[in-house]
Amino acid sequence: MEALRVWRASSNLLGFAVSRAAAAASTASAGRAHRLHIRCCSPAAAATTKPPQDRRRRSASSSSTSDRDSIRAIRLKKVEELREKGYEPYAYKWDRTHTTKELQETYAHLEDGQVCTEAAVSIAGRIVSRRAFGKLVFMTVRDDSGTIQLYCEKESLTEEQFEQLKAFIDIGDILGASGSIKKTEKGELSVYVNCFEILTKSLLPLPDKYHGLTDVDKRYRQRYIDMIANPEVADVFRTRAKVVSEIRKTMESFGFIEVETPVLQGAAGGAEARPFITHHNSLQRDLYLRIATELHLKRMLVGGLEKVYEIGRIFRNEGISTRHNPEFTTIEMYEAYSDYESMMNLAEEIVSRCAMDTLGKLKVDYQGTEISLERPWRRETMHRLVEEATGVDFNSFGDIESAKNAATGLLGIKTESHENTSLQACSSVGHVLNEVFETVVESTLVQPTFVLDYPVEISPLAKPHRRHAGLTERFELFICGREIGNAFSELTDPIDQRSRFENQIKQHNAKRAAMGKKVKSAEGKGDDDDEYSYEVSLDEDFLTSLEYGMPPASGMGLGIDRLVMLLTNSASIRDVIAFPVLKLQQ
C-alpha cells in the first residue's frame, strides 16, 4: 500500500488533475480499479485491495520532490534485487529482427484473433503504457519508428519471468521482447511474448500519458523528456535532417563542394554582430567564435575553388527570442563568375526542393497562413517597399536630418525612447531607411519576397550597384516576415573593401559612444550591457587575400533553423533546435 501511495503522489507531481482521478475512481468498474492497482511501482502493489478514497482524491498541490525521490528509491531497490537474482538491468545489446513499424506493415493483413505462430520476431523499445489483468499483461512499446503492443500471457512465459514482469517492470523501462505475432480480438496487432529482457531500468517516472509534458521551459531544458512525452517532437528533428540532406543534394547537383572553415577566429568578421570571446591559453591570445563563415569561404575563391559552401554553426552574443538563438545553423555559398541574380534563382531552388522533399507540396500552412512557394517569387527594391508602406520616398532626402525627422514622425518615436537613440545614432540616410524598413515593412512580407538593392552604408561586403549610385547589388529573402537569406554580388575591389571596413568601424564606434552615454545617463550603467559594447577590428589577412585577386562572384547565406521553422509549422526557433540556449533556472 505504501508503494501505491508513492505512485499516486508521483502522478500528482507530474500533472494528474484531481478531477480526472476522482471521476475515474467514481465511474470505473472493479476491473478498471484492479488495472490501475496493478500499475504500481512495486510487487506489493499487485494486491487487489482497493486504495482508500482519500488517497485517490489527493490534491496536486501535495506533490513534492520527495515523491519523485521515493519512486527513484523504489526503482533503485528493484535494480539491486534484479542483480541479486542474476539479472543485469543495463544490457549490452539486443538482437532485434524488426522495428515496430515494420511489424505493423508486414502483418497488417492478419484477421482479428489470428495468431501467426510461424513468425519469430524480436523487438526493443521503451514501455509507455502497461495494463495488467490477472494472468494477462498488456504493454505498449515504442521505438524510433512507432509503437506496438506486447501481449504477455502467463502460460507463454516461465513462472519466474511472469513474476518479474509484474514486479520489476515500470513504465519508462526499455525492454527487449521476442515471440510470435497475434492480432487480438479487438484488432490490435501484438507481439505474443515468450521471452523478454529488461535492457535499461528507468529510475525516474515519465510524465503522465494524459497531459504529457506541457511546461514549455522544461520541454526545452530536458528535450529528451519532451521527445518521450511528445513523440511528434522527434518528427521536427527528422524533418530538419531531411532539409539539411536535401540542401546538400541540391548544392552538389549544381557542382558546389562542401568545405570547413574555422569556428575560432582571430577577428570577428563577415557580419555586424556581437561575438563571443574566448582565450587560448597556449597561444596567449583572445579568439572569437565565428559570427559568419563568409570571409574564409571567400579566401577559398581566391585560392581557386569556384563553387564552395559550408553548413555550420554560427555564434552571436545577442538577444534571445522566438526568432533568435545565440547559436544557429546556416549555409553560406559562393560561386565565381556569377552575380546576385544567380543567387535568387538558387534560393528559390533550394527552398522549393526542401518543401517538396519534406512536405510533397509547395503550399505551406504556417501558423494559419498559407504560404505559396511556387516560383517566381516577388522581387522589389527596399526603397520601393518603404515608399509603398509609408508614402515617403527616401531618395528625395538630401540630408540626414530631414530623413531622421521624417522617420521620427513615421515611427511615432518619443524623444526619450531607446528607438530614438538608435535612430539618432544613424550616420546616413541609408541607415535611416533601413530603420524604417525593419520597423514598418519587414513584418508585412509574408509571402516569399526578395528585397533588392540595399544602401551601400549598411552593405560593406556587397558590390556597388552597376546602375544606381549609393546602392549595392544585395538582396534579402523574407518569408513570413522573417529574413531567411542574405546575398550579394560580392565586392572584389580590395581598396574599396578596406575603405568600407574602416567606415563600418567608425560607424560602430560612434553608435557605441552614443548608446554608452545614453545608458550611463539613464541607468548609471557602463556600456558593457549595450549591443555596441564590443570592439570591431579589421581582418587584415582577408584584405590581403583580396589583393591577390578574387574572381567576380556572388554569395548567399540561408538560415536553416528558420527554414525548418517554416516547413514544420514551428512558432519558435527553440522548437527546431534540439537544445536551445536558455536563461539559468532560478
Image (cartoon, rainbow, N blue to C red):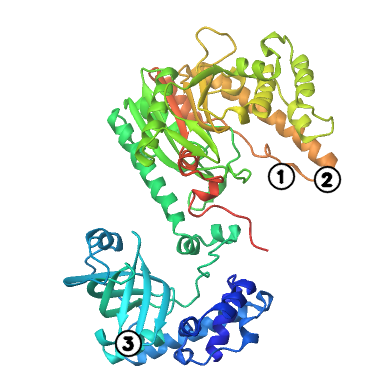
The C terminus appears in which quarter of the rendering?
A: bottom right
Given the image, on which type of amino acid does mark 2 rest?
A: Gly
User: Looking at the picture, does residue 232 appear above or below residue 415?
Assistant: below
Numbered tag placed on residue 524 in the rendering: 2
* Nearest to viewer (mark 1 / mark 3): 3
Identify which residue, 95 or 532, lies in the foreground. Answer: 95
Residue occupying the point 37% across, 30% down: 300
The Cα–Cα distance between marks 2 and 3, rounded to whole angstroms, is 71 Å
Q: CA distance from mark 1 to mark 3?
A: 63 Å
Q: Which residue is mark 3?
A: 162
Work out whether residue 453 can be spotted.
no
| Residue 498 x, y percent position in the rendering | 54, 21
Residue under label 1: 529
Q: Position of residue 391 (x, y in %)?
A: 70, 15
Sequence order check, earlier mark of 1 and 3: 3
In the picture provided, is 340 more to the left or to the right than 288? left
In the picture, the disc for residue 6 is: none
